Amino acid sequence: MPGAIYAEGLVKAFGDVRALDGVDLDVPEGTVLGLLGPNGAGKTTAVRCLTTLLRPDSGKAVVAGIDVLKHPNEVRRSIGLSGQFAAVDEYLTGRENLQMVGQLYQMRAKAAKARAVELLEQFHLSDAADRPAKTYSGGMRRRLDLAAALVVSPPVMFMDEPTTGLDPRNRQQLWEVIKQLVSGGTTLLLTTQYLEEADHLAHDIAVVDRGHVIARGTSDQLKARTGGERVEVVVHEREHMATAAEVLAGFGKGSTTLEQHTRKLTVPVTGGAKLLAEVIRELDIRGIEIDDIGLRRPTLDDVFLSLTGHAAETEAGEDDLEADTGHQSEKEAAK
Ligand SMILES: Nc1ncnc2c1ncn2[C@@H]1O[C@H](COP(=O)(O)OP(=O)(O)OP(=O)(O)O)[C@@H](O)[C@H]1O
Ligand SMILES: [Mg+2]
């Protein structure tokens, strides 16, 4: 039986650009799928197709058990989307915005008011509740927008980069809200540029590149695919790097990488903590003082890098990296 979000062979082209080139997705009810991919990979296009905002050229999509192409209006009633549906009205206050959404969903005025208070509290907007949204900072708007998407708790939610532009504290708080939501049974598809976010929230991850799902699995499965563990050593004296490299070569399962400026050596290993103890002992016998040593497992960033051939963007301001990716992003295209 297909999951709460199901897509098969979704294709969407814009002129020559095949934004989606046969995307398959299946998200079991009550779970979170993290959709990862470089700029221009097709994440937003996939979300827009699944939420009825865009009609795919071909393929099939079923959301909350409803055929998206045949019954878009019914689908709209069963989903929440942060970003588009919950458009914030600049001239209304935060409170009024949330009450209005409640009323659009036919909540009684009293219930809509109570829900607004609850959400304002949850998203730390109580102090600003009665100011027009146009006076809100970027992060506050983002939170109001997300709160609006949560006024009625729909069984299926889509969030396109929900925490982009939020500071670390607000991001953490939103993660808590999302976890609560999912523990209540909501199915969620979320796109994100923050791999840590996917690692933290997503049961399953689908990596998209050039309109294709190129990898799929849990964070651990993807990490295991990327390669095993490494020992990283930072030696105290740069002159000791050569000797340290010799020591590591004796334990490594591959070639040692040296980073002169940070005095860091890295070697792939198998054997875990026991091996680490042996490496430390051997370095000590050779009289090599170390500043830091550790066993490092691949991060989701390593996975992303090895799958797509380039690193995920971390913070806004690194947009110039896009030039190296060979993709054209939405923002670029708009210029
Ligand atoms: N309305 C449109 N008209 C023309 N091209 C579009 C349109 N929307 C998207 N595209 C193109 O489709 C491709 C996929 O875009 P999409 O916005 O889905 O990527 P994304 O993965 O969401 O990227 P980002 O990480 O930058 O948000 C890009 O090449 C983009 O330029
Ligand atoms: Mg996008």
Image: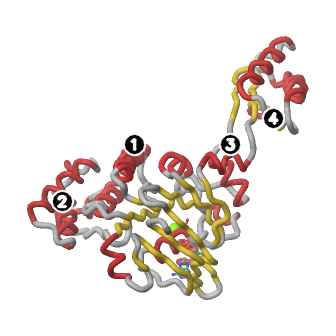
SS at badge 2: helix
Q: Mark 4 vs mark 1: give the one in front.
A: 4
Left or right of 249 on screen, residue 188: left
The residue where tag 3 is placed is 298
Mark 4 or 1 closer to N-term? Answer: 1
The residue indicated by pointer 4 is 267
Tell me the kind of residue under disc 2: Arg
- Disc 3 and disc 2: Cα gap in Å? 44 Å
Whether the residues at callouts 1 and 2 have beta carbons within 8 Å, the answer is no
* Residue 158 sits in quarter: bottom left
Residue type indicated by callout 3? Pro
Mark 3 burial class by Cα count in 10 Å: few <14, some 14-19, many 20+: some
Q: Residues within 10 Å of mark 2 (few under 14, many from 20)?
A: many
Give the amino acid at mark 1: Arg
Q: Distance of mark 3 from mark 1, alpha carbons?
A: 25 Å
Identity of the residue drawn at 53% across and 78% down: 334
| Mark 4–mark 2 distance (CA, rounded to whole Å) | 55 Å
The CA distance from mark 4 to mark 1 is 35 Å
Q: Secondary structure at mark 4?
A: strand
26 vs 129: above or below: below
How many tags in the picture? 4
Asked whether the beta carbons under mark 3 and mark 4 sit within 8 Å of each other, the answer is: no
Badge 1 element: helix
Q: Earlier in the sequence, mark 3 or mark 1?
A: 1
Residue linked to disc 2: 95
Badge 3 residue CB within 8 Å of ligand 1:
no
Q: Which residue is mark 1?
A: 169
Q: Residues within 10 Å of mark 4 (few under 14, many from 20)?
A: many
Upstream in sequence: badge 3 or badge 2: 2
Indicate the quadrant of ligand 1 in the picture: bottom right
